[in-house]
Structure formats: structure tokens, C-alpha cells
Amino acid sequence: MNPLPAAPADTTHDTGGIGGHPRGLTTLFFTEMWERFSYYGMRAILMLFMVKTAAEGGLGFDTKKAAAIYGTYTMSVYLLSILGGFIADNFIGARRAMVAGGIIIATGHFTMATGSIPAFYTGLVLIAIGTGLLKPNISTMVGSLYSEEDGRRDAGFSIFYMGINIGAFLSPLVTGYLAQSEGWRAQLASWGLNPVQSWHWGFGAAGVGMTLGLLVYVRQRERLAHVGNAPAPEPGSHGRPWGKLGLVALGSVALIGAMKLSDTYPAVILVLFALQIGAILFFGFRPDPDSKRMAAILVFFFAAQIFWAIFEQTGSSITLFADNLTDNTAFGQPFPSSWWQSVNSAWVILLAPLFAWLWIKLGPRQPSSPMKFTLGLLFVALSFVLMVPAAKLTAEGKVSPLWLVGLYFLQTTGEMLLSPVGLSTMTRLAPQRLVGLVMGIWFLASALGSKLAGVIAGEFKSDNPAELASFFWQQALWVGAATVALFALVPWVKRLMGGVR
């Protein structure tokens, strides 16, 4: 993907949107809110739907198979964002890519709602493709609303990020209620409908969310007429770069296929890590500054993968822990286990302003980017340390929901230290000619971490407290070891960054 384009100068006078920002931001805010509603709403019930028996309305998959599918799906969403960005940058523009992506996403959700296994897999593929088209390009559109000198730019992205989390917070509450609640199932039965098919109402609600996002976008499209246009062919070029498109598409599919092999051959992951360490050393000991910065980027990439491998289990192993082993009641009233998927977003909404204030308050005294990454890994490791005693307590029955509240607090704290910091650091470290490649690397870290999360979650077992405690403890130790290693490397990484903080 190319660097974010600058908007025309007259956008600085557009103050008709949220908080005095361009009106186009309001449109993109609600479009993204509904798109994230659809994505996180479906994700909240996906793992549960796969492992529930046919009598319960599910697919009856075992945990290992369901986790592998979940990991491949979430990996593909991130990985295809690279292809989606390339298509927009070189062929159809961000605006058309968003519309096409939204239509494909909605089609995928409604396909899943029909109920058959072929429709289930088809829906997952469509959602991954559509999200790959929409997700990177809507962020590009936000950046295009502002000139580089516009002081509202960072605040605009903060507002946009809040829209993401509002959608992610609300969606599991809606889809989880429709998929799991006894009240809704009783309502279906009263209408003469099969109550065990409630899962498909949840998938359908996700599709309705994406459709609402598309309606907002199309009705207010004139606000965005000046940004996201299809690029003109470069002078002297021979049309569009179809050959490069083929290579990007082939590379994306090949990497998805290679990582899919890790379901059967876990050694694939070890080879992947070895290659990354080799690349870090290769670039790190070259004399030119750009190579050294690339080595620093790869260190952050390595750390981010490990972080997401734990964090992304919230939709797999942690969802199963919530469903099978947690007392899902509040004030004496039961609630669907999928509602836990809203807690991370709630913590983000609460903590993001606190961290923004903290970094401003500390100013030059704030930790360096490598140290923030180290702290991010530490907090996500502590989240699984916390789950060790919780796992042991399951021997006495279902555990208090406060354990999961604590887990999500620790993981969200780690997210605040790593995710926004990583995005900012990538853009500052990347050589100008390689900004698109470096942003692709950042997406790739999320993709590979998500797949690794699925591989690990396949080992989750809820019927043996000792094995379950070992499951969490082993991962906490591995991430703890990575934390110590990254802490030891902080001085070296700072030197590699060449003055970038």
C-alpha cells in the first residue's frame, strides 16, 4: 500500500463533521462502526457454533479442528488486507474498494446464515476477501481527509478508532443474544421456528450490520467524492500492473496455504521463526542505516506475532473457557458467554484516553518504543499467569467471572502499549520508498499471530483442570521468555532505530 495521500487544501475548511472535523469523517466513522459490528459480532459466536453439537444447532467439530479453522480465517482477514490495499492503490481506488468489500462481506454473513456446511465455508471465504478490500482502505480514506499539516489529523484517527471499538463492543451483545439466549430461543419456538437454529440469526444480524454500514456510506458518498479515487496509469507505463497483482495474489494464497500446513505439521512454525531470526541478523549487521532500521522493524514484527498469538485466543480458547467453565451470571441473571467478547472493547474505550494522557504527561520521559513493546508482552504474559489459578479452581466448579475481567484488563493494557505504538513506529522507521511494504509487514504480523493462536488453542481441554492450568502456564512461560529476551535487546534495537524514538 502506498503512503496515505494528502487531501486537497480546501478540506481544512470543512468543519461540519464530528467535533469540527471534515464531514467525511462522520461518514467513515459510522461505516467502520457497522463494519466492525459485523466482523466482531460474527467472530464472537464463530468458535462456539463450530464446537456445539448438531443437537445444539452447531457443527459438532472438535476443538482442534474448530481452532484451526478459526485461526486460518482470522489470519486470512489480515493477510488479504495487503492484496486489498494493492488493488485499491493500483486499480480501483479506495472508495470503490470499500463498496466492493462491504457488499462481499454482507453476502458472506447472509450466506453463513443459511445453515449448510458448504455455505458456512463459503461465507468465511467471502468475509475474509471483503474485509481485505475494506479494512485497509477505509483507514486510507480517513488519512486522505487531512493535509499533512492539518492539526486535526491525529485527533481524527482517535475518533475513528473509537468508532471501531463502539462497533466491537455492541456487536457481541446483539449477536450473542440472538445466538445463545434462552429468551430468544423461546421467542423463536413461539413463532413455530426451530430454536436450535438461533445461531443463524446471529450470523444474519452481522450481515444486517454490514448492510447498514453500506447504506450510510452510499447515502453520504458525496462527502467523500474528493478522496479515494482510482489512480491514473503512470506516464510511460503499459497500463495497470497486472503482473504485480498476480504476484501479490499468488504470494498471499501461497502463504495462507503454507500456514495451513501448520495444522498438520507444527514444525512449519519453527521454520518460520528461524527465518525471521535469520533476517533480523542479516539486516542488523549490515552497515547502511536503512538495513538497520529494517532489522528493528523485524524485531517488532517478531514480538507482535507472539503478542497476537496470545491475544487472539480471546475468540478461541478463552471463549471456550468462558462458555464451559465460567459462571456467566451478573446480579443473579445469566448472560450469553459470547458477551465476554465485548469486554476488551469496553476496556479500550476506558483506557485509551488514559494512555493518551499518560504519554503526553511523560513527554520525553516516556518509555522508548522497544520498551513499550516489552511491557506489552509482559502484560499479555501476566494475563495467562492469572488464568493458571483460575484453571485449577475449575476442579470445584465454574469460576467467578472476575477472572475473565482481570484477563481482559491485562490484555487490553498490553494492547495499548503495543498496537498503536507499533503502527506509529512502523511509519517512522520505514524508508520512504518502502512505506507500503512495511505496513504490509505489520499486517502480516497480525495474520501470522492469529494463525498461531488457532494452532495453540487446538490444545485447549476443559475437562482436566491440571492440564488446563499447564496449557496457560506453558504459554505464559514462553511469552515471558520472549519478554526477557526483548528487554535484553532494547539497547541494541534503539541503536538499530538510528535516533527514531
Image (tube, grey):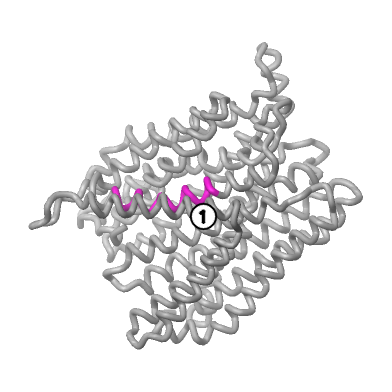
Q: Residue furthest left?
A: 236
Please give the residue where the numbered disc 1 appears in the rendered image: 259
Can the viewer see residue 488 in this picture? yes
The N terminus, quarter of image: bottom left
**Image coords of residue 43 (percent x, y):** 58, 42
The C terminus, quarter of image: bottom left
Question: Which secondary structure is most common in the magenta stretch?
Answer: helix
Q: Is residue 89 magenta?
A: no
Instruction: Name the residue rendered at 73%, 25% in the picture.
Output: 55
Determine the image quadrant of residue 383. bottom right
**Image coords of residue 244 (percent x, y):** 26, 54
Can the viewer see residue 21 in this picture? no
Q: Relative to the observer, which residue lies in front, 179 or 168? A: 179
Q: Is residue 75 magenta?
A: yes
Q: Is residue 184 left or right of residue 491?
A: right
Q: Which residues are magenta?
A: 72-87
**Image coords of residue 206 (percent x, y):** 52, 34
Q: Residues within 10 Å of mark 1 (few under 14, many from 20)?
A: many
